[in-house]
């Protein structure tokens, strides 16, 4: 159930983003000046979208697609969602992963993780919330990646703090798949020194660089305990708004005890964004 919910939420945000960008292009095609935002898409895929609404392909009205209950009632399995994506001309996805290594992870498991650090490692099986989340997401997203590599980064450690990110693979290469990502995370968690303060801005800025270079739609999965100080909240907020200028869908997977007031506000507010580009998923609630 946890994996299905995370997958459906990520897919919904991704589809909404695709619809927004292509409708922008459709409107601009009627004007003398054309936008380049969807011009690079293959003609067949573009024509398929213009001739049939994405929401019609999914069997949802525009009003229904903004209601998660309607989406959940329509789709019950991963294969149903992936089939709908293929029919909509989205056979695969591109994913960027960011993992929070700030010091607040040490105490954010008091209620939800038996008082342990959220990065605690035990044995060879997925143990901590970060490992379990990666395992769940990998099980369902792998078939849709079709071999696309996964750029994966850490932030909030004693070296990068709130100013930069570091690649989970030291050479800087992206992870080959979610198994590779799990190994890279486990290796990093064994040696990294948790620090902070926390800011999502460096990660989101890196995601913007990747999206601008590749010109492909990306889902950015941010695994975080979500504990931001005022400065980190302000910089992260600006980065979320800036991401709405690019084909980026942000899914924040909140781990630990919370609360997450800033993340909740971003999920519902930020009217200066070009579109609603963010979805918050509370890990503890979907795993009860």
Image (cartoon, rainbow, N blue to C red):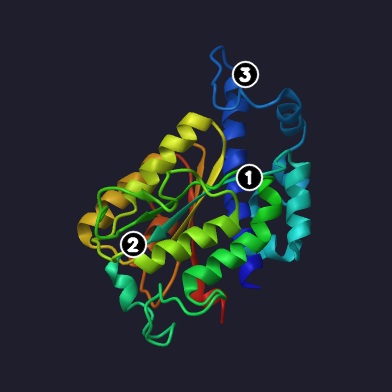
Answer whether residue 245 is visible to the viewer in this image: no
Q: Position of residue 130 (x, y in %)?
A: 48, 68
Sequence-wise, the earlier of marks 2 and 3 is 3
Looking at this view, name the residue that lies furthest to the left: 231
The local secondary structure at tag 3 comes to loop
- The reply, left or right, for residue 189 in relation to residue 145 is left
Are the residues flagged by discs 2 and 3 in contact, CB closer than 8 Å?
Answer: no
Mark 2–mark 3 Cα distance, whole angstroms, equals 39 Å
Q: Position of residue 125 (x, y in %)?
A: 57, 76
Mark 3–mark 1 Cα distance, whole angstroms, equals 29 Å
Answer whether residue 132 is visible to the viewer in this image: yes
Q: Position of residue 274 (x, y in %)?
A: 44, 39
Which residue is at a point 50% across and 72% down the rendered structure image? Answer: 283
Tell us which disc is closer to us: 3 or 1. Answer: 1
What is the quadrant of residue 195 in the picture? bottom left
Sequence-wise, the earlier of marks 3 and 1 is 3
Tell us which disc is closer to us: 1 or 2. Answer: 1
Labelled disc at residue 30: 3
Q: Position of residue 255 (x, y in %)?
A: 44, 71
Is 222 or 21 nearer to us in this picture?
Answer: 222
Sequence-wise, the earlier of marks 1 and 2 is 1
Which residue is at a point 66% across and 73% down the rendered structure image? Answer: 1
Q: Which residue is mark 2?
A: 262
Q: Is residue 93 above or below residue 228?
A: above
- The reply, left or right, for residue 109 in relation to residue 65 is left
The local secondary structure at tag 2 comes to helix
Q: Which residue is mark 1?
A: 93
Mark 1–mark 2 Cα distance, whole angstroms, equals 28 Å
Q: Residues within 10 Å of mark 1 (few under 14, many from 20)?
A: many
Which residue is at a point 59% across and 66% down the rendered structure image? Answer: 135
Is 168 or 277 nearer to us in this picture?
Answer: 168
């Amino acid at each position: 159930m946890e994996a299905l919910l995370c997958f459906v939420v990520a897919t919904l945000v991704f589809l909404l983003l695709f619809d927004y960008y292509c409708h922008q292009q459709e409107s601009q095609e009627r004007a003398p000046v054309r936008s380049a935002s969807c011009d690079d898409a293959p003609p067949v895929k573009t024509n398929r979208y213009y001739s049939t609404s994405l929401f019609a392909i999914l069997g949802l009205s525009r009003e229904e697609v903004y209601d998660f209950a309607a989406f959940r009632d329509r789709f019950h399995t991963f294969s149903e969602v992936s089939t709908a994506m293929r029919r909509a001309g989205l056979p695969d996805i591109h994913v960027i992963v960011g993992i929070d290594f700030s010091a607040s992870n040490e105490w954010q498991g008091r209620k939800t993780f038996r008082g342990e650090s959220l990065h605690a490692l035990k044995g060879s099986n997925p143990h901590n919330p970060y490992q379990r989340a990666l395992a769940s997401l990998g099980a369902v997203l792998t078939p849709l990646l079709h071999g696309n590599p996964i750029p994966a980064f850490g932030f909030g450690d004693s070296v990068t703090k709130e100013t930069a990110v570091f690649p989970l693979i030291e050479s800087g290469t992206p992870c080959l798949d979610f198994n590779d990502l799990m190994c890279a995370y486990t290796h990093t968690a064994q040696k990294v020194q948790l620090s902070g303060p926390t800011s999502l801005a460096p990660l989101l800025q890196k995601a913007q660089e990747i999206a601008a270079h590749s010109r492909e739609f990306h889902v950015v999965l941010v695994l975080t305990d979500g504990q931001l100080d005022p400065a980190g909240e302000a910089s992260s907020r600006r980065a979320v708004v800036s991401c709405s200028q690019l084909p980026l869908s942000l899914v924040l997977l909140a781990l630990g005890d919370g609360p997450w007031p800033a993340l909740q506000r971003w999920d519902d507010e930020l009217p200066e964004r070009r579109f609603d580009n963010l979805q918050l998923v509370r890990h503890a609630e979907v795993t009860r």
